[in-house]
Amino acid sequence: MRMSRLFGRTLREPPSEAQTPGHQLMLRAAIARPLAAGLYTWLPLGFRVAKKVEQIIREEMDRIGCQEMEMPVLTPAEVWKTTGRWDLLEPITFRTKDHNGREFMVSYTHEEVVHLHAINEILSYRQLPAMVYHFQSKGRDETRPRAGLLRTREFVMKDAYSFDMDQAGLERSYAAQHGAYVRIFRRMSLDAISVESDTGAMGGDVAHEFQVLTEAGEDRLAICSRGDYSANLEKAARKIDDASEPFPKAARSEIATPGTTTIEALQASLKLPASAFLKTLLVKDRDGKPVAVVLPGDRNLNEAKLRKRLGMSDVQFAGDADFARAGGVAGFVGPVGLGAPVLVDTAVVAGRGYVAGANKKDTHLKDVALGRDFTAERADRRVDLHDVIEGDACPTCGAPLAVKRGVEVGNIFAYGTYYSEKMNATYLAEDGTRKLFVGGSYGIGVGRSVQTIIETSHDDKGIIWPFAVAPYEVHVVGLPMNDETVHAAADALVATLEEKGVQVLYDDRDESAGVKFADADLIGIPFRVTVSRRSLQSKSVELKPRASSEAELVPHDIAADRLVDIVRRAREAAAR
Amino acid sequence: MRMSRLFGRTLREPPSEAQTPGHQLMLRAAIARPLAAGLYTWLPLGFRVAKKVEQIIREEMDRIGCQEMEMPVLTPAEVWKTTGRWDLLEPITFRTKDHNGREFMVSYTHEEVVHLHAINEILSYRQLPAMVYHFQSKGRDETRPRAGLLRTREFVMKDAYSFDMDQAGLERSYAAQHGAYVRIFRRMSLDAISVESDTGAMGGDVAHEFQVLTEAGEDRLAICSRGDYSANLEKAARKIDDASEPFPKAARSEIATPGTTTIEALQASLKLPASAFLKTLLVKDRDGKPVAVVLPGDRNLNEAKLRKRLGMSDVQFAGDADFARAGGVAGFVGPVGLGAPVLVDTAVVAGRGYVAGANKKDTHLKDVALGRDFTAERADRRVDLHDVIEGDACPTCGAPLAVKRGVEVGNIFAYGTYYSEKMNATYLAEDGTRKLFVGGSYGIGVGRSVQTIIETSHDDKGIIWPFAVAPYEVHVVGLPMNDETVHAAADALVATLEEKGVQVLYDDRDESAGVKFADADLIGIPFRVTVSRRSLQSKSVELKPRASSEAELVPHDIAADRLVDIVRRAREAAAR
């Protein structure tokens, strides 16, 4: 490919909207361009990277017997309504109507659709297990598209679906996908770790995310310093000393706290640590009734955990009417005598005396103890509703947890019969009865993977593409192109390389050495070869790997053979 | 691929909704499945065909220097509004809104979007010409989806776009695309002819369609019997003797025709041929005002030609108010004294005396002549608004035209500055001024091509895939699979073939010979190899090309080598 013809120009400066290093470099190197907020076009260079990423995913899906197919972008409302997700997904999806008024969703994911197909195509247990996948555009009406390709409103996802006879089969399929994901990300040179995750809108209990640690990420992860536990903060647990304490000697008693409505203010006025207080939040349950959530003052509510506990897609905080209904007073709510069920967080120590709101203006109670002064919703069972923080104890080994940022490049869900029950999706079992499919789904975002590679593989000059996903393998720079000897030698080298199947980006432009080298560093092709007047005088060309600062001179007459050999070896290494 | 594991089952009988042979076979052979009216999923077998078709297109686009990229499915309303197509395309497109109320179109085509990118990426004439393409899902809200993949509401189209400095450049790009299309369809074994076509919603004047002649098609084409002219009937012309006749001797006069409102009824009552009458139709123009269209009684209106003449996307026939306004009487409308502009079709002979409506109930006029009794809208210039019919004279050579049915598998448009003018899409020309891009667009529907291959390559048993697009290359049938010797021999043959890179579909099911052979014929893989108890007794396997009725025995020990050789040669032939 001649750069003089390349559709997509490099930019000297990052556009002002670029939020992360990868976002800046992706735009500067002409990988993709925004068309509107969260909508991107792959320019030719980026398209080649995306296709190589796709091909790696395809090969690993094929390797585990997963069959490629393709389901549509537009999916009829009826199929979503069978599982209740037509309404559930409304806030985050795009919908359309045909001219007869029939409704469609721009597909968000394809669990329902693939179950419909399974019902038609899989008649008997003899056809199980079955795994299928496709690459298809997904629409998600994100309120806040973010950081280029990291969070967009349209993106191509590889989504795979497994169908098994039973839980044991699902576990095998899940393990096969997990193994494929490990290989996929390794082949892309993404250092992805598998962490336990919340199942969100997918249903079921078991799910993992593949997270790449980088400050560009928006997910927060708890990671054990000994390496035996990692989870998204939406789901992360910690080891908690479950011993209860003896009740305080004193009975609870009122203290005057005029105008003191926050933990910080209480700390200051009562000279007590945050952990001495109970924080009581009033939210609504699925029926709109008030529910109280009680946490120690030094812990933050984790909304994902609470959403999951309530079975809701959003946490809705209580309004004035709810406070009135529950008998609480805003700023002075506490669990004692409150007219609402109380969810008590696991971080609240049973028996210990806390300072809590008195449900009375300008008043708190001290010596308030769980088990004596108030009880949790269900037989004093506490629920994990708080954020894990740096330094908490690993739930597996007790070693300190670190909290890091990551980008979720893949996720896998073992939802079991979540969809097949609702859709009555069954197969004829060996014993002659009809049984429900037991399933899982497995996603990888292509664009997000591409940008995450950039986030984790660049220097201050530009991208450093891992060989396996580089848009081209060799970048030939002719300097200057108006020198006929240089021009002819560069043309000939490129022709020989291309004839031997090497993917070459050829900078044939009439630009200065400075501009050409800066673009080569920015675009980040693994091997740069400079054919210059000076190098030809010493019967050589200059070879420089992008990842190295060292260049070497290679005799001109063996340059093509040498490059073909380097590329062959790099391909072999990348395929492993 | 083992058929016991294949996702997608063959059907004994065609579903009742199947409208054409290709539609029936596509469903029966598990190529695709409908999800809703006009929405299809590619099952794994069909997906492989679609990808091979895509790859052929890709190779030929790359060969002419067209660069692959990818634009989104969701496209913002604003960009369509710059050219007026947001409103124009409303009847045939799907729209959606995000939660902030911003509107998007599920992309119908990408002329506007690609011009936006060209404005950003192409700064100067040095970067021209440029051609880009992508494969992307398109949404079209067809009122009548039809015949499976022949007319769907979502489909993947390869759309390419050229940008040139001037008309001469556009002509070169257009010719390069035309040449690529010829190679593409030949490589798919589609006998596509290039015909002149209407430009429809694309703008511009020059356009060609690639049509495959088959009764399954819904387009009608005029084709010269000597081969020097072909055009879609929406655009087709014919040679017309332009000589005018002397005016009739008699002045026009009224004749009573009570209740006689159709040409057929007039023919019967007046004992005259259809060609003796004038047919006058009242329609609305873009401003909603009445316009009359006058044709000879033996010619039908071609709505596409009229739409183009009026610059409208639909022909709107006049209502009662329009008749009143123009002074016409429904059933007795005629051009004489009508209060509306009159478009006179080219088939109306100037000077000749016709029978026409008198704009008066139960009355016609005879001896009505163009040029004496009425005049055409603009200085008696007639316009071509009629359908060409079988036997009309070729506009090039005068030989008889045939009218045939075809499927449009590709189309190319040279729209010039149609978009760049409206979008102010310019580049810096060599003379320092800013000039408009001169462009064209070039589409191929992937799914429609796949089904058209089936429409034109099948027998009564099933599909006969051309080698280049067959889902697999060799179909190995083991018979019976519960015979251990057969099972082992078939497994070994498949393993050897796959190791050597041959694409094998392996029927390893416990089914009868009848079922397996019927499925092999239905699915239509080019080479069937049967490993049976009987063939092994004679130390052979049976080889049968799908397209031939002759089978031959091949010695078992050389079968794999022989097949590898056959496949290699078939691949070479298919790549030419």
Image (cartoon, coloured by chain):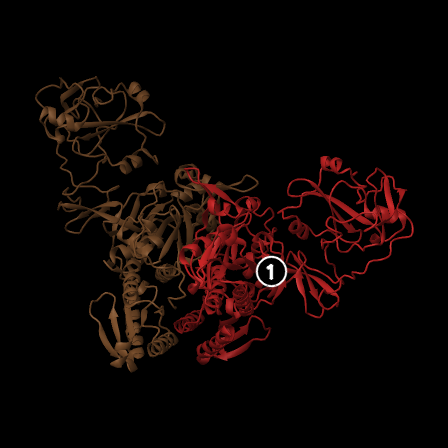
Chain colours: A brown, B red
Q: Is residue B53 left or right of residue B353?
A: left
Q: Is residue B116 left or right of residue A61?
A: right
Above or below — where is B256 with respect to A410? above
Residue A102 % position (x, y): 53, 40
Residue B130 % position (x, y): 46, 63
Looking at the image, which is closer to me, B78 or B74?
B78
Does the image show residue A17?
A: yes
Residue B229 sits in which quadrant? bottom right
Q: Residues within 10 Å of mark 1 (few under 14, many from 20)?
A: some
Looking at the image, which is closer to me, A210 or B24?
A210
Q: Is residue A84 left or right of residue A331?
A: right
Task: Count numbered badges in the picture.
Answer: 1
* Residue at image location 35% in from the left, 26% down from the top: A288
Does the image show residue A126?
A: no
Looking at the image, which is closer to me, B293 or A56?
B293
Residue A240 sits in which quadrant? top left
Q: Secondary structure at mark 1?
A: strand
Residue underneath mark 1:
B206
Q: What chain does mark 1 sit on?
A: B
For the N terminus of chain A, which image quadrant?
bottom left
Three-letter code for the amino acid on which mark 1 is drawn: Val
Above or below — where is B541 with respect to A451? below
Above or below — where is B14 with respect to B497? above
The residue positioned farthest toward the right in the image shown: B250
Q: Is residue B65 left or right of residue A477?
A: right
Residue A163 % position (x, y): 40, 51
For the C terminus of chain A, which image quadrant?
bottom left
